Amino acid sequence: MSQKAIAVLTSGGDAPGMNAAVRAVVRTGISKGMKVYGVYRGYNGLLTGDVKELNLRSVSDIIHRGGTVLYTARSEEYNSPAGVKKAADFCRQLNVSGVVVIGGDGSFRGARDLTNEGIPCVAIPGTIDNDIACSEYTIGFDTAMNTAMDMVDKIRDTAQSHDRCSVVEVMGRRCGDIALQTGVAVGAAVILVPEVPFDMDKDVIGRILENKGTGKKHFIIVVAEGVGKVNEIASYVQEKTGIESRATILGHVQRGGSPTLRDRVVASEMGHKAVDLLEQGFGNRVIAMQNGKIVDFDITEALNMKRVFDKNLYDIAHTISI
Ligand code: F6P
């Protein structure tokens, strides 16, 4: 029987720790006697044939590097039945009998479609947003939060010197987890997230005026990308409170940098587990973390789960930022 071959790709927005996951997949696969192909630029690599067999040394010196050595993309062509079929045919040509996909929920849908076309896939949650419902943790989240915290600490220095209010946007289009965690860690006076409706006059201006009344002189407002409008918020705060205000959008700085210990370790565990599942013949699975343990779910089931926002922490943040 010919040697079992698997492939690994990274897809969607990059996240620190993806390289650690790729390394774990390659090394686990090879240690189980498999051939492991790296697929470049997400699903596009399966359409253009941009793949390379990786060896143990191909993934040396990458565990500490941000970004993804396999590059990443959001593939238009793959998002069609014909694209998926073409990718599956290419896998069959290479004798690839399993693919590990590292990315967010868009990438998971791609993995489900490829499995349905006959190529078993196991997906690993890799996104700084922490927006995968089935998993309490996604690779890259810890690094991104720590980067955001460092940046806001610097902004606080200048806000404090000038007695200003700084309104800072962090990433997270549909998910306020980076804003919530960072907001707590920097002692933000206000945290705005897409999951919790708010009233600008009561919940933002009212809070600031109340804190001003007890002697507070500088303020940090952390806003998730999904709420946005940081320039308008800053202007409104200045107009209504008389406190000079500035807006900052942190942007892609949050996606880069050397992964934290947590991201490296979780990525290594998840990468290892993904290959284990493929070896046992499982496909259409997603790796997840539940109660700190690495587990797996059916992808379709995982995609139907609803995320739960940590409203308790959100309330605590507002109770103690007075
Ligand atoms: O999903 C990760 C993420 O960084 C989001 O927080 C953000 O909305 C989006 O990707 C940005 O995507 P792009 O890099 O394509 O601008």
Image (tube, helix red, strand yellow):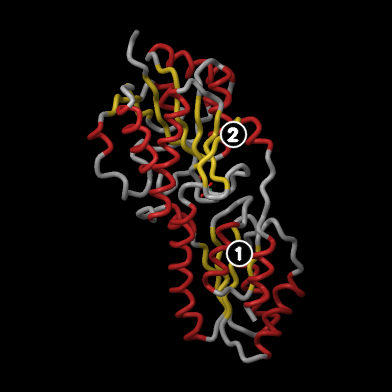
* Quarter-of-image position of residue 47: top left
Quarter holding the C terminus is: bottom right
Of 136 and 96, nearer the camera is 136
Mark 1 vs mark 2: which is more N-terminal? 1
The residue that disc 2 covers is: 297
Residue 107 lies, in percent from the top left, at: 53, 34
82 is higher (above) or lower (below) than 11: above
User: Label 2: few (<14), some or many (≥20) within 10 Å?
Assistant: some
Secondary-structure class at tag 1: strand
Say which amino acid is labelled 1: Val
Q: Nearer the viewer, mark 1 or mark 2?
A: 2
Of 204 and 249, nearer the camera is 204
* Quarter-of-image position of residue 284: top right
Q: Residue 295: which disc?
A: none
Which residue occupies 64% across, 65% down? 313
The residue that disc 1 covers is: 223
Q: Residue lying furthest top in this view?
A: 1
41 is higher (above) or lower (below) than 251: above
Which residue occupies 63% across, 44% down? 133
Instruction: Give the number of callouts.
Output: 2
Say which amino acid is labelled 2: Phe
Residue 310 lies, in percent from the top left, at: 66, 58
Q: Is residue 75 left or right of residue 22?
A: right
Q: Respond yes or no on whether mark 2 lies under 8 Å from ligand 1.
A: no
Quarter holding the N terminus is: top left
Residue 242 lies, in percent from the top left, at: 65, 85
28 is higher (above) or lower (below) than 129: above
135 is higher (above) or lower (below) than 199: above
Q: Is residue 314 left or right of residue 18?
A: right
Which residue occupies 58% across, 73% down? 188
Which residue occupies 62% across, 52% down? 175
Secondary-structure class at tag 2: strand
